[in-house]
Amino acid sequence: MAFGSFEHNKNPHPVAEINMVPLIDVMLVLLIIFMITAPLMTHTVKIDLPKAGAQSEPEEHDAIALSINLDRQLFWNDKPVSRQDLQQRLQQIATQTPQPEVHVRADQAVPYRLIAETLSDAAQAGVTRIGFVSEPDSAK
């Protein structure tokens, strides 16, 4: 990579030619890197993410409010029910067409086991339209 020689020749100026070999080596290395990384960038997990909006959806007329309070009591449209009565009511709405949606409202301190048992009862009854109700996050 010398631009001139140590010999005294007729032309004392440096050689004005650019050595292309290092540039070609760098380009080939970059080409290989891009050939390796490009397929990795196209393999992604395809997920249909839910859309979040600031406005709440209007409630349907045939929606049922199933609430669980801190004392572990079950409420069907704000009326207290036992677990056996809840199971019977879930079986009744499972046969309706169209099936009403069950909106589950549970206190955040309620043990998950009770919520899981309630969802299991709904699944065993054949209820397929279940939604969870929560308060909007105020810390935005």
Image (tube, helix red, strand yellow):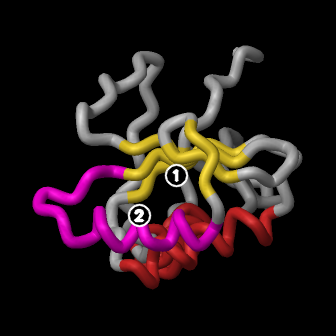
Res 51 quadrant in image: top left
Q: Earlier in the sequence, mark 1 or mark 2?
A: 1
Amino acid type, mark 2: Arg
In the rendered image, residue 102, in percent from the top left (x then y), is placed at 41, 51
What secondary structure prevails in the magenta region?
A: helix
Q: Residue at x 30, y 68 (%)?
A: 92
- On residue 89, which mark appears? 2
In the rendered image, the quadrant that contains the N terminus is bottom right
Q: Residues within 10 Å of mark 1 (few under 14, many from 20)?
A: few
Of 2 and 84, nearer the camera is 84
Visible in this render: residue 25? Answer: no
Look at 85% across and 60% down and name the residue there: 111
Task: Tell me if residue 21 comes above or below residue 7 in the rendering.
Answer: below
Quick check: is 91 in the magenta stretch? yes
Name the residue tied to disc 1. Answer: 17
Of the pair 43 and 65, the residue shown nearer to us: 65
Give the residue at x 33% y 41%: 63
Note whether residue 115 is visible. Answer: yes
Q: Which residues are magenta?
A: 83-101
Identify residue type, mark 1: Glu
Residue 97 placement: quadrant:
bottom left
Residue 62 painted magenta:
no
SS label for mark 2: helix
Q: Residues within 10 Å of mark 2 (few under 14, many from 20)?
A: some
* Image quadrant where residue 94 sits: bottom left
Residue 13 point in image, percent of width and height = 66, 39
Total marks placed? 2
Q: Position of residue 55 (x, y in %)?
A: 41, 17
Q: Secondary structure at mark 1?
A: loop
